[in-house]
Amino acid sequence: MKNPVKIVTIGGGSSYTPEIVEGFIKRYNELPIKELWLVDIEDGKDKLEIVGSLAKRMVKEAGLEDKMKIYLTLDRREALKDADFVTTQFRVGLLAARIRDERIPLRYGMIGQETNGAGGFAKALRTIPVILDICKDMTELCPNAWLVNFTNPSGMVTESVLKYYPNIKVAGLCNVPIGVRKSVTDALQVPDEEIELICGGLNHFFWGRQVLHNGVDRTEEALSKILTDIENLPANLRHGKPWIREQIMDLNMIPCAYHKYYYLTDEMLADQLEEIRTGKGTRGEQVKKVENELFELYKDPDLKVKPKQLEQRGGQYYSDAACELINSIYNDKGTTIVVSTKNENGLIDCLPEGCAVEVSAKVYKDGVKPYPQKPMPIEARGILQLMKNFEQLTIEAAVTGNYGKALQALTVNPLVTSGAVAKTILDEIIRENWDYLPQFHNSIERYKY
């Protein structure tokens, strides 16, 4: 039998944690975990203890109490020593920061979203320095470990690791591709194992580029049925307006949900503003309410399994992505998983070599092997390049604290509609995240008099 593994989860006090614990329990016979360390910061101590206690009850309920040991700590370095895998699912500034990220752009009539536009930019500025600090510790304490990143904005976070810590084995993950895959299998009414879905693009900006059913290309059919299914939903069950059918059919690729912020910007903005007007609040405010309810459930000493309500939080499919990737590496399985990884040998032909792209790949113990990608069509090429320019400028600004680069990043983002307003938004982001953005303290005064 192979050696059992030590896994460290940074952001262990997250409400997502029961999802990943469940995934590890389900796979224990294939993936024997001797230690699972849940790590958080002082501000997350109470949640860590609540989630950690639930994790221990889940492991005990599964009969693994003496095999899979759960450790809780605020000492990241203690946890990282000799780790085999490190998963990251942290949120710098907690949900309060997410809510600010969503609220600031909305004040100026722009999309307020945690990984897109100005909101995603703000989150990246806070997050990238932290992931690089974690990488510094990993280089010293567990240099052979894999880093499995689920922290958003996952693509930019992963690219920062690829650029600044090239010796660390890293894969970025997201559960959105699993949702796209499910829409394909539902539309074609075929078993999951018969489908090969080849995705390509960027995190939260990828397309399902080809659908193969038992080797037969059924992309156009799947796309048409997906669009028809959405059109037939009652209006109250749609997320914003349905896609523009002619546009998507001409593209002949399946967009992910986040493309609506770019293809249907005005409609999505109107939906966000309506939710503010009717008192529902931003998505972050809605999630905060769900999370508070979840932690009340987690406190129940009789709760010994992941509660169904976690799916409302957005945790659905998390374990399928993170746990199966680790399982595939450990067992050299070659499982097909959509990952953020390095763009090499012209994989996505219109993007720079070495940047992070999100693609379908087979995962082995020695790394990820992406599926070949067709040349990106002209219909997607320009906006994909623009988004990558935004990401790379944002990464540079986050690392260097270069105010000019930060302003350039916001200015080129398609969801920021004015260069002059971009400066105002940038200054608000810095002031409202002052404690998390020390790299910009010399750029502006904290308070405007």
Image (spheres, grey):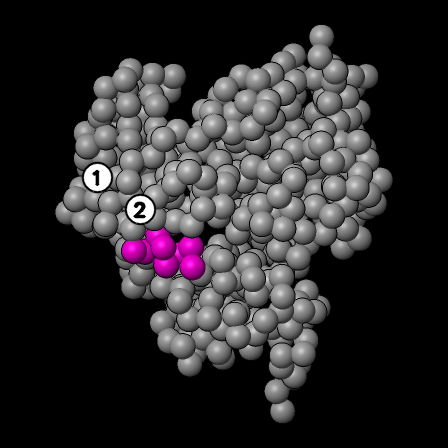
Q: Residues within 10 Å of mark 1 (few under 14, many from 20)?
A: many
Q: Residue at x 67, y 79 (%)?
A: 442
* Residue at mark 1: 252
User: In front: 351, or 266?
Assistant: 351
Residue 238 is labelled as: 2
Residue type, label 2: Arg
Magenta-colored span: 382-389
The residues bearing labels 2 and 1 have C-alpha atoms spaced at a distance of 21 Å
Residue 365 at what x, y percent from top left? 59, 22
Residue at image position (36%, 63%) is: 414
Q: Position of residue 317 (x, y in %)?
A: 50, 32
Residue 300 in view of the camera: no
Let me know if residue 386 is in the magenta part: yes
Left or right: 290 with respect to 377?
right
* Residue 433 horizontal side relative to residue 371, left or right: right
Residue 315 image-quadrant placement:
top right
Q: Residue 174: x and y, percent?
A: 50, 39
Question: Which quadrant, please, contains the C terminus?
Answer: bottom right
Q: Nearer the viewer, residue 279 or 364?
A: 364
402 with respect to 282 (left or right): right
Q: Residues within 10 Å of mark 2 (few under 14, many from 20)?
A: few
Give me the residue at 42% from left, 71% from top: 411
Q: Nearer the viewer, mark 2 or mark 1?
A: 1
